[in-house]
Each structure stands twice: as C-alpha cells, then as structure tokens.
Amino acid sequence: MPKTPALDDRSLLAPLLASGWTLDADRDAITRVFTFGNFVDAFGFMTRAALWAEKWGHHPEWSNVYKTVAVTLTTHDAGGLTELDVKLATKMDALATP
Ligand SMILES: C[C@H](O)[C@H](O)[C@H]1CNC2=NC(N)=NC(=O)C2=N1
C-alpha cells in the first residue's frame, strides 16, 4: 500500500489549531488534551474514536488519566502530518462535543 503523502497544504491545520490542537513542530505532530466530566465519558470517547481509527487504519498515540485524554496525532509511515491526521482530529473534535 502506498504511503500517505505529507500534508503539503498546511492551511488545513488552521481550524484544528483554533479548536485547541497544538502543533509539535519537532515531531510534526498535533496534540490536544480533552477533558470530560468523568471517567466513563472519557473512556466512551476513546471507544468511539478507536472504532474510527481502526476503520481508517490510522491510530492515535494517546493516554488517559481519569477524565482526561491526551492525544498526539502524526503519521508514522510518513514521518509527520498527513491528511489522515486532520481527518482523525476533526472526528475527535466532533466526538468530544456534547
Ligand atoms: C498497515 C497499517 O495500516 C499501518 O501500519 C498504519 C496503522 N496505523 C497508523 N497510524 C498512524 N498514526 N500512523 C501510521 O503510519 C499508521 N500506519
């Protein structure tokens, strides 16, 4: 399977950076900490996001502490951001919105 191309159009990041994502330039990754009302909501978010990640064959680096979920998105095959990261971040924002 061909590698996903690098994200050439960086303007695609703008809505994500405005919604709470941060660019980690060293890794060419985006990060965001989601905070929920309780552990069940946090884990429910992770469960729903995991199904999209698996469907798209694109997986987050993430960790959960009680009601927070810290997410890092980058494309390992590409060594940096691709449109798949934008797609998954956008989906995560939607899933986290009550
Ligand atoms: C074969 C499989 O699709 C690849 O290994 C996928 C799996 N999930 C992945 N997820 C992320 N974030 N980056 C990848 O390069 C990646 N590669």
Image (tube, rainbow, N blue to C red):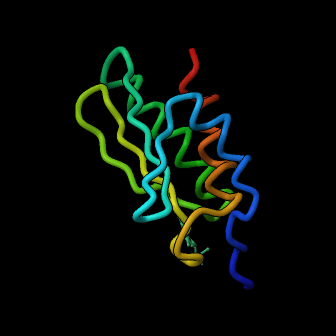
Foreground residue among 81 and 53: 81
Direction from residue 27 to residue 77 in the image, left or right: right
Badge count: 0
Q: Where is residue 70 in the image (x, y as percent from the top left)?
A: 35, 41
Farthest residue, direction left? 65
Q: Where is residue 36 in the image (x, y as percent from the top left)?
A: 39, 20
Farthest residue, direction bottom? 1
Image quarter hosting the C terminus = top right
For residue 27, above or below residue 93: below
Image quarter hosting the N terminus = bottom right
Q: Where is residue 51 in the image (x, y as percent from the top left)?
A: 59, 48
Q: Quadrant of ligand 1?
A: bottom right
Q: Where is residue 27 in the image (x, y as percent from the top left)?
A: 42, 65
For residue 55, above or below residue 20: below
| Identity of the residue drawn at 37% across and 24% down | 35
| Identity of the residue drawn at 59% across and 76% down | 78
Direction from residue 94 to residue 12 in the image, left or right: right
Direction from residue 76 to residue 94 in the image, left or right: right
| Identity of the residue drawn at 76% across and 57% down | 9
For residue 98, above or below residue 51: above
Foreground residue among 92 and 24: 24
For residue 32, above or below residue 29: above
Which of the 4 image quarters holds residue 80? bottom right
| Identity of the residue drawn at 61% across and 55% down | 85
Direction from residue 21 to residue 66 in the image, left or right: left
